[in-house]
Amino acid sequence: MAIDVKSITQLISEFRKLQTKDSITPESLGYILQRLADLLATAGTSETVNSIQTLLNGFKAAGQAVVSLQQGAADRNNILANIKTVDLGNGSIGNATNHLFIQQATTERAGAMRAQQVTDLNNARRAVADIQKILETVQAKLGLTEGNKGLYNNAQIQVTVQAGELRMLGAQQLIADGYVPYLFRLTRKRNQWGDKVAIEAGAAPKKYCAVRKGWNLYGSVYSISIASDNTISFSTNPHSHQSQKAIGYSSAPDTLVTSFTRKDGTPTFGWGRSSVKLVDRKSTAKKHRMIRLRFAIGFAKKIMPGRSLITTANLVSSLAEFSLIYNPSTKTWHFGK
């Protein structure tokens, strides 16, 4: 710290002008000496001076400090900035206008998004929206609902057999979203011909449509019920009334089979276009044989009976397959995989 010696210099100058005898007294001399002692007491030590010098050297080495930063003029590719700085060594102020602050992004480095990239991004968003509209149109034609955003059956479901009953796994969200289960059989099938226009025009009437082989719908939207514990039960309506609301539901396996006895006493059941015998045709003793029938369950939007043909293309889930097995020793049906 610098010492102010002006007052001491003035006292010394006045002390030197004294000429008269006894003008210099211990009191006047002591006063000057005390002032000198007081000023020396306010002076810093060499350590303080060294610390201050080190700080000053650090400021000079640091160079400039930013005191103000604002965005500059608009640019299509880079970000410009107005920067105000101060020199820490001498306190001078510097200004940089429209200084290149952030360069444009490239495949090699990160940076500012260019105006053309924003234009391309907006065009891509509009293209995606157009594709989404086309996708929704295709979904509507396939019978898919708004909640399903894919063309493929992504929801994976499974049927298991527990204590002789069927249980559905993985369908809770589908049911919550309003989808309903449909029952399919692996059969050969052909429906009755219903083209009245062709008949009225004088064309040869047709009794049946073309034969379809594969997973064919059994019944309608009313054919299956899934309880809160995921137990699956089936409509007890006769086969010819499966398109009507069920009078009841049962989880028993034989609910899915309509058995009858032929005139020759052979027990038989219907399976698509076929009539299947429960006895071995090669056996003279007419022994019953084991039979395995393939069923599957899939989920789709609710389509009322007679509105349109329901196929596996309408499904928003996978097919959960199970089997209906006839045990010849007990002459009973049970579920299997």
Image (cartoon, rainbow, N blue to C red):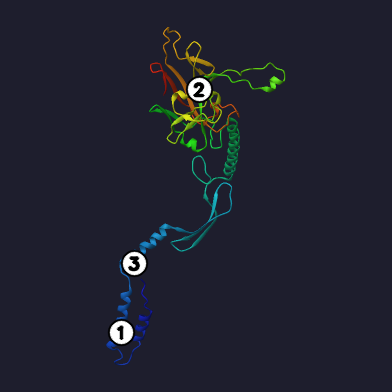
Q: Nearer the viewer, mark 2 or mark 1?
A: 2
Instruction: Residue 336: tell me if it is visible.
Output: no
Q: Residue at x 47, y 37 (%)?
A: 173
Q: Viewed as shown, does residue 205 lie left or right of 156? A: right
Disc 3 marks a residue whose amino acid type is: Val
Nearer to me, 196 or 56: 196
Residue 149 occupies quadrant: top right
Marks 2 and 1, the one that precedes in the sequence: 1
Residue 136 occupies quadrant: top right
In percent of width and height, residue 280 lies at 44, 11
**On the image, numbered disc 2 is attached to which residue?**
185
In percent of width and height, residue 52 lies at 36, 65
Which corner quadrant holds the C terminus? top left
Instruction: Residue 275: tell me if it is visible.
Output: yes
Marks 2 and 3, the one that precedes in the sequence: 3
Disc 2 marks a residue whose amino acid type is: Arg
Q: Is residue 284 above or below residue 188?
A: above
Q: CA distance from mark 2 to mark 1?
A: 123 Å
Element marked by disc 2:
strand
**On the image, numbered disc 1 is attached to which residue?**
31
Disc 1 marks a residue whose amino acid type is: Tyr
Q: Residue furthest right?
A: 201
- Which label is found at residue 49? 3
Marks 1 and 3, the one that precedes in the sequence: 1
Q: Residue at x 41, y 28 (%)?
A: 165
In percent of width and height, residue 208 lies at 61, 18
Q: CA distance from mark 2 to mark 3?
A: 99 Å
Q: Circle 2: is it few (<14), some (14-19), or many (20+) Cα within 10 Å?
A: many
- Tell whether label 3 touches label 1 (CB within 8 Å): no
